[in-house]
Image (cartoon, rainbow, N blue to C red):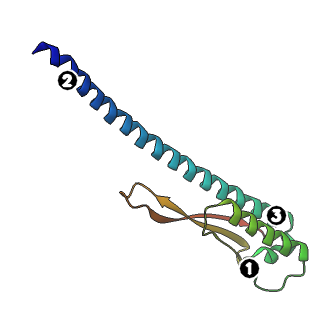
Amino acid sequence: MTRGLGLLDAMIALAILSFGLLALTGLQSRTIARGTEAQSRLLASQFNDELLSRVLVDVANARCYTLPQVGNCTSASALASTADWATSVAAALPPPVSTSSTLDAASGQLSVLITWTTKDRDAGSMASDIMRQQLAVTDVRP
């Protein structure tokens, strides 16, 4: 009887080790997903700051930096800069990406909103889409 106990002990140890390795794999997967999400949030924040900085440098043409474009804009370079910014945002974040910026003429505040979608893998076996948003507001009065 004692000759088979060593084999049984080894099989039990192997099963425990297998479950432990499976748990570590799941943990690593969630860590990678969280890191990717944090990177997307950081990128969105940097893009918001970039557009707001462009507006603060060119306050006279603040209305040219609205998306979608509203009102009169006489600065072709500001329009091109805003379009390039929106293209860069769309290329850097997971699709679908939407960008908008609005200027409140009464308060002089410019709001920049970036929206993108990520997959939530913690919702069970089916990954669901979650809408993420990053909003930045600054005062652009001259």
Q: Which residue is denoted by mark 2 in the rendering?
A: 8
Disc number at residue 54? 3
Mark pair 1, 3: CA separation = 18 Å
Establish if 47 lies above or below 74.
above
For label 3, the SS is helix
N-terminal of the pair, mark 2 or mark 3, is 2
Mark 1: few/some/many CA within 10 Å (<14, 14-19, 20+)? few
Identified by mark 3, the residue type is Arg
Establish if 9 lies above or below 141.
above
Which residue occupies the extreme bottom position in the image? 71
Q: Give the percent coordinates (x, y) of residue 103.
A: 72, 76
Mark pair 2, 1: CA separation = 78 Å
Q: Which residue is denoted by mark 1 in the rendering?
A: 105
N-terminal of the pair, mark 2 or mark 1, is 2
For label 1, the SS is loop
Judged left or right of residue 82, residue 134 is left
Where residue 53 sits, quadrant-wise, is bottom right
At x 74% / y 73%, what residue is drawn? 108
At x 90% / y 77%, what residue is drawn? 75
Identified by mark 1, the residue type is Ala
Establish if 70 lies above or below 142.
below
Where residue 58 sits, quadrant-wise, is bottom right
Mark 3: few/some/many CA within 10 Å (<14, 14-19, 20+)? some
